[in-house]
Image (spheres, rainbow, N blue to C red):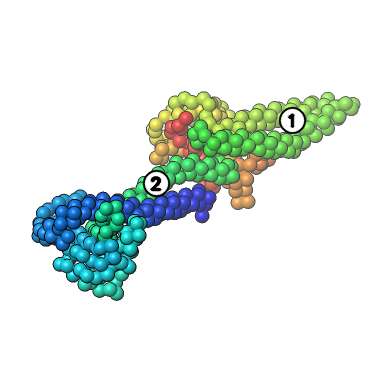
Amino acid sequence: MNIRTRIFFVFAMAVITGFTLLAYWISSDVGDRYSESFEELMVDTANLLAEIITTDMNSGDTALLQLDDAFRRLQLRRFSAQIYELEKTHVDIHVYVTDDKGIVLFDTDGGKAVGEDYSEWRDVHRTLMGQYGARATHVTDGRPTTDPEEELTIAYVAAPIYRQGEIAGVVTLAKPKSNIDRFIAKAKSNLILAVIISVALVLLLGYMLYIWVSRPLQTLVDYAHSIGRSERIKLPQLGDNEIGKVGEAMDSMRQALEDKQYVKGYVQSLTHEMKSPLTAIQAAAELLGRDLPKDKRVQFADTILRETERLNVFSSRLLQLAAVEKRRDIENRESFVLELLMEDVIEAHALECKTRQVKVMLNRTAGPPIHGDRFLIRQAIDNLYRNAMDFSPRGGEIIVDIYPLESYTVIDITDEGPGIPDYVGERAFERFFSLPRPDTGQKSTGLGLNFAREVAELHHGSLVLDNQNPGTRARMTLLHTISS
């Protein structure tokens, strides 16, 4: 698991845990808040009943006949009250009254409890003591008692009845909490649904943030891998942020390391390759200082000129290759027809081919123009064509095929030379590696193929060599259009 996935996983766990704890705290608290509201209303109602009963008793209705009659009619009353999702159709309150000893004097439940001693009940006992009296009792209400979820909770709230400033009795209002339990259950259900939706939205936003951050990170990782594979690639667009700054720092570090390695490799290769012509020049110069015949002096002077020219060509090719290898993008873009460019290269070497009796055949299939660096592509093709001429036997033939293939243009240059030895392989594209020419046995600078491949890759193409029996085919592919 990569670090980005771990961060998202930790974030998701933190969100889920946080919302779960919040939901648990709110759901635990919402029941208490509903109960407080429910009980507060019962306190008001109980005290209102206490004042009505006090009035009735003071008017001589000690049996509370008017209250009894009112409750009988109340229990028969039918109505329909839609309280949000609850439809209420009857009154479900219960009232009983005790004297100052806790003996029940009045009971709206058909008088069943009249005469019983309720002085030990919490609501009656605390009220007679001058305190707030209330209790909650669980009853089965005829349902199985083995299932605690089927229990019915009844809330009791008492209020004192005063006579001449003294507590003369207690009135208790009882009401089942079944309806409020439904409200609480509904509120908890809505809360859970809201939490689930909120968690989903937060995780979705977190995932979008994860993608937004991880995508440039993955792009940066791919860029680092491309650098490790020595691929020619530009720094991708990573945005003006910390990731972009890391990418820029990585690109600067890559450039610095490449420059260091580049200089090191070129100094080593240059030293090795220049040693031979310099040694030849030094030896010829030393011999020229002696008293030699004219023909020998001319021979040694020719050696110095030849080796000097070799060094000049070598330096020129080296500078060209260095300029291409340092590029990460095409600087001079223009549209041109590759077939015409190939014709120009063939025409430039027509005299040399005629002298060596080498025939040239150009097969071309019209395709879209190339959009790239015309100068570099011409030099690359020229190098490939020179190789074909150098390895072609006298009276041989060079075949050039140009044709479009999907989004690329292919240039095949095939000679009838001895082919590439099996041991060479990819070494043919190494700097300073060269095979002896069949007719002279001399080697070239070993930079032409390396230069041509660099140009092809700069144009998002490729260059490969393969044997054709007889001869060798150099196949270069170039992308029609390279985006900036």
Task: Give the residue drawn at x 14%, y 51%.
Answer: 81
Task: Give the residue drawn at x 32%, y 60%.
Answer: 128
Residue 62 vs residue 276, the one in the foreground: 62
Task: Give the residue drawn at x 68%, y 31%.
Answer: 314
Task: Give the residue drawn at x 22%, y 70%.
Answer: 115
| Image side of residue 407 versus residue 99, left or right | right
Residue 62 vs residue 385, the one in the foreground: 62
Direction right: furthest residue: 291
* SS state under label 2: helix
- The tag on residue 360 is none
Question: In this orientation, does residue 394 appear?
Answer: no
Crowding at mark 2 (Cα within 10 Å: few <14, some 14-19, many 20+): some
- The tag on residue 307 is 1
Residue 351 position by quadrant: top right
Question: In this orientation, does residue 77 appear?
Answer: yes
Q: Is residue 119 above or below residue 469?
A: below
Picture coordinates of residue 277 (x, y %)?
76, 33
| Image side of residue 321 versus residue 122, left or right | right
Q: Label 1 vs label 2: CA separation?
A: 75 Å
Residue 336 position by quadrant: top left
Q: Is residue 253 above or below residue 1?
A: above
| Image side of residue 47 versus residue 202, left or right | left
- The tag on residue 202 is 2
Three-letter residue code for mark 2: Val
Count of numbered marks = 2
